[in-house]
Image (tube, rainbow, N blue to C red):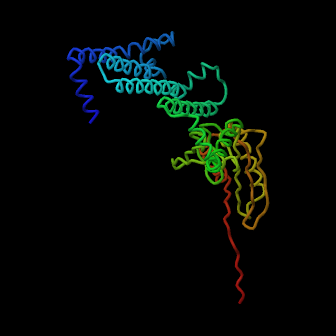
Amino acid sequence: MDFLNDLVNIITTNTASDYIASLIIILIFTVIGPMIATFIIKILRIKEKRLTRIKRHAFYKPLKGFISILGVYIALNTLVLPVHWVLFINKSYRILVILLISYAFSNFFSSHNYEPLKKLINFTGNDALLVFVSKFIKALIYVITGFIIINELGYNLSGLVAGLGIFSAAIALAAQDLAKNIIAGCSIIIDKPFVIGDYVGIASMSGTIEDITFRSTRIRNTENQVISIPNSKIAEETLINHTQMQKRRFLLELTLELDTDLPKVLALLEKIKLLLTNNNHILQNNIKTYFKTVSNNGIDIVIDFYTDIVDYLNYLQFKQEMNYEILDLIQKENINLAYNSQTLYIKK
């Protein structure tokens, strides 16, 4: 009821010209907002003249929003309003300005600003470290903003902190896992067993690292599923980073029929070695082709070498081509591959 009375008083107290003037002020600030924001960004980035790049700047939208809100604030202050309305408008204006400042600095540490940020601080380290630190700073900005707004609303922060102290033991117990994950996340960033984009194997799963957060690491597996693994579990598990491989091993064991002539076996091994020697992707100091043993099924030979092709898909293609060429040599030598067999003796 008080609200309706206040509204009636405002309508009757202010004239039509007052409302028109307020509306004009709002329209003017709304129109000039983008222009002023663009001008300020140009001052901040003197060499930047492209409008699309200016509009993507971290401070562009907050500046434009601030000018629009300022216009509304000035327009409302031109009207005759009750004192408690003025106090409410002033407080709302200050809170909105705090939120805009928080948004501006939070946006400054967002992913689309990593490259400008790296240039600004001359950062040459790991991108994962920059992502992790920027997320920490953004979280800190939100926490500080929350406390400032609570203080602005008139709540006693010292009393709030004292109240939280009562539950500190319970919170500490509940946050044990979170603390472990954060510490493990910091360890991952510092130790750098992997970075975003690496293909890794952790425990029974493997995939590409997509993100490293305070609590977990996200991996996209070969089935295109995103798996979140707690950082503490990653720190405890054995990890294989396939991306950091400098070479891949090719190992092939073949069993020739037991009645294959020995000269044919030796000739085949020599031809396979020659084939491997002429391949530019095979590391020449690790080529091994040898007669391994005579097994129950036949003559076992081994082809063992390393290749500089480390990308998994490219390696699969390379492996297929090598298998074709080796099989072609075997067929040209008129040698048959053996298969598992058993001899049964039946007692009469």
Q: 324 or 5: nearer the eye?
A: 5
- Eyeballing the image, is 163 above or below 144? below
Can residue 250 be seen from the camera position used here?
no
Left or right? Give the position of 263 relative to 323.
right
Q: Quadrant of the N terminus?
A: top left
How far across and how far down the image is residue 3, in percent? 28, 33
Q: 107 or 78: nearer the eye?
A: 78
How far across and how far down the image is residue 266, in percent? 77, 52
Q: Report the label total.
A: 0
Q: Quadrant of the C terminus?
A: bottom right
The residue shown at (55%, 45%) is 220
Kindly indicate the quadrant of the structure image that contains residue 248. Answer: top right
Kindly indicate the quadrant of the structure image that contains residue 7. Answer: top left
How far across and how far down the image is residue 212, in percent? 60, 39
Kindly indicate the quadrant of the structure image that contains residue 88. Answer: top left
Left or right? Give the position of 209 relative to 32.
right
The residue shown at (68%, 63%) is 338
Q: 126 or 84: nearer the eye?
A: 84
- Eyeballing the image, is 20 above or below 234? above
Residue at the far bottom: name it: 348
How far across and how far down the image is residue 174, in percent? 61, 50
Can residue 284 be seen from the camera position used here?
yes
Q: 342 or 192: nearer the eye?
A: 192
- Eyeballing the image, is 175 above or below 152? below
